[in-house]
Amino acid sequence: MTRGQAVTVGMGSMIGAGLFVVWAPAAAAAGPLLLLSLAIVAIVAGANASSSAVLAARYPAAGGTYVYGTERLGALPGFLAGWCFVVGKTGSCVAMALTIGVYVAPDYAPVAAAVSVVAVTAANLSGLQRSATVSRIVVAIVLSVLAGLSVSVLLAHQSGTVLFRDAAGPDLSGQPSAYGVLQAAGLLFFAFAGYARIATLGEEVRDPERTIGQAMAITFAVVLTLYVAVAVLVLGVLGPEGAARSTAPVAEVASQVWAPEWVWLVRCAAACAAVGALLNMLLGISRTTLAMARDGHLPSALARVDGPHQLPRAAEVTIAVVVVVVAVSVDVRGAIGFSSFGVLLYYAVTNASALTLAGTRRGQHTVAVVGLAGCVVLVATLPWSSVLSGALVVALGAVWYGARLRLRGSSTSFTVEG
């Protein structure tokens, strides 16, 4: 896989459901200070991406922070990183699938979500090269539609048809608190975490020491610019209060500048984005599951690779089944909070691992400290329901880890296969 393909896969993972649905819960928490929350999460996400790139270049193996944590911090931190990644990203996949259902077939959202997971899994099983091609197409569609919407909003504003609201104005009944701003940042992190997909491609890219870092930097810069632009559109047209109430804020923006029949362009783009992100996230989760199964942390059947492309088919099918089952019992907002909890903890281990690297530049050490502190703070300020459910699942993983060690009577040291 080339650098361009890695960038495409990363963008396909980051330009997903978050771009179209995360603004509502974030605006409800931060209100008119939503852009401040976006700046905070950009700093934390950028630090995480930098630490991930440094570690991925050192350990170009499937598994991402599961591998880094195991190598740098020990078996238990590595296991917990892998467990948090699988759990958090499974929540992300559920959110992506439900977004597809809500946008394409709102009256049959769970069924549409299940069908989308099956279709995407089939695409992944056909080979990584084809998945990268699909991601390229999806990204092109989404960017084209959003560019058209942006131009339409600007033209409507100039003509006086649509007037931008004061995004900093006090149009909410209560002023947002620092806690609300941080909570919104934690929820917005759900939309930025897709660059982990690039790190999990360590065994599949050419010249990983250079390619992974460059691909992460390019992906992050492009996607951050896009998210800022969409945030300005949503806040400018709907206002903080309108964005907080809307279940499909970007589509509502389109409804104010386009004829009703053209709003479906945005709905289709949202579905395409969610499909692209779901495709790449399922790939990433399966690779981490593969690495964990290789080390005996998960059933050995999940470590099998087969087919002409030597793909972890068992792991991919298993994850898909779990996503389908969960998608019929939760809503999008709950999935976003749960996903952010798991993935933020995953990146806390990433930054902690980066701090142990010998010969690391002082600047990179500072970046890792910022990333670690940011992840911990954002986790603590997520909605209490997300913290409670996430902590319970993480605790169950730790119990499983301890029980497995006791049952096998083995040591806590494991060797990671590259």
Image (cartoon, rainbow, N blue to C red):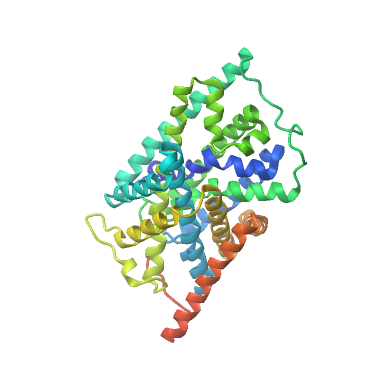
Locate the C terminus by quadrant: bottom left
Please identify the quarter of the rendering in which residue 38 is found: top right
Q: Looking at the image, which is closer to me, 299 or 284? A: 299
Number of labels in the image equals 0
Q: Residue furthest front?
A: 107
Q: Looking at the image, which is closer to me, 381 or 107? A: 107
* Residue 359 visible in the shown view: no
Q: Residue furthest bottom?
A: 409
Residue found 41% across the figure and 84% down from its top: 408
Identify whether 33 is placed above or below 325: above
Residue 27 image offset from top left, x and y in percent: 65, 40
Residue found 57% across the figure and 61% down from its top: 345
Identify whether 173 is placed above or below 330: above
Q: Is residue 258 left or right of residue 384?
A: left
Identify whether 360 is placed above or below 402: above
Q: Is residue 34 left or right of residue 360?
A: right
Residue 180 image offset from top left, x and y in percent: 71, 48
Residue 33 image offset from top left, x and y in percent: 71, 39
Identify whether 179 is placed above or below 348: above
Q: Looking at the image, which is closer to me, 40 or 170? A: 170
Residue found 50% across the figure and 41% down from its top: 218
